Amino acid sequence: MRTPVIAANWKLQKTVKETEDFLDALIPEVKDAADVEIVVAPVFTVLMSAGRKMEGTNVELCAQDVYFEESGAFTGEVAPSMLIDVGCKRVIVGHSERRQYFNEDDETLNRKAAASLKAGLRVIFCCGESLGQREAGKTNEHLSGQLTRGLKGLDMDRVDVAYEPIWAIGTGKTATPGMAQETHAFIRSHLKSMFGGKADAIRILYGGSVKPDNVKGLMECADIDGALVGGASLKPDSFAKLVNFRSQ
Ligand code: PEP
């Protein structure tokens, strides 16, 4: 009932040419992929040309960040409607690197998500605990706070949640399927407390060193509805394998 989402987060990587070459290789490999939503999030400067390449394909363009104002004196920022203007269908909000290096707090992220939804984008809203929080037994408490503040008042029909334990991002340390499922089940129960029965339809993606050789085990878990992938999304053959996870 929840269509899986496989999303590439390229972070600060790939030029226009590199992106075009990637998409030329990827699109034929995934064109017949059924029952999966395919999402690629390049840097801002690449969005327009990537959007053109994706037109008429089953690959959707996503931005890695957005601002919550539509226009004005906000040097360096990009508005939700500007993302739509260049072909974006989605935006990632609240990646742990934005929280950590750019001091984005849950209230700011809530405003970013609300403005994005208002403009017509889908949102991938990220949450996740640090190693210290996990070791101190504070994972659930931390996630509840992030979700309660970050998702407050949002129309969840167009929001996917991404659970990304910070200790698993880019480290090669993936949560085991059992560990990830346990936390995803907790997240769904928290979403139920916030949004009632609607929570059953919300996709919860896992992120943190997902690779072709571990994707299937993760995707078999009852509450894991997709993956948000950094490192293993940078090569078209590796990302195509993730998209085609059922045949791994
Ligand atoms: C990410 O950037 O969201 C991520 C999960 O990265 P990686 O797959 O490299 O751990």
Image: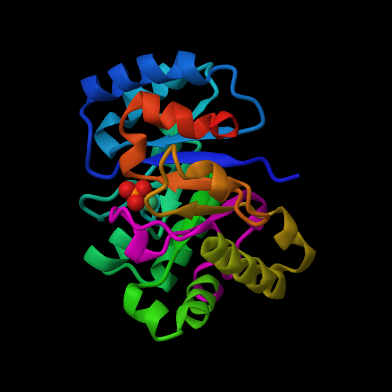
Expressed as whole percent of the image width and height from the top left, the position of residue 69 reads 39, 55
Where 72 sits versus 82, above or below? Answer: below
The residue furthest bottom is: 136
- Residue at position x 44%, y 40% in the image: 213
Q: Look at the image and give the residue range highlighted in magenta.
A: 148-177
Estimate the x, y position of residue 209 in percent, counting from the top left: 37, 50
Q: Is residue 47 magenta?
A: no
In what quadrant of the picture does the N terminus appear? top right
Q: Report whether residue 71 is seen.
A: no
Depth check: 72 or 151 in front? 151
Side of 183 where 86 appears, left or right: left
Residue 65: x %, y % from top left: 35, 50
Q: Nearer the viewer, residue 89 or 202?
A: 202
At x 48%, y 73%, the residue is 146
Residue under the point 40% across and 72% down: 129
Q: Is residue 190 left or right of residue 12?
A: right
Instruction: Answer left or right for 104 relative to 139.
Output: left
Q: Position of residue 99 (x, y in %)?
A: 32, 66
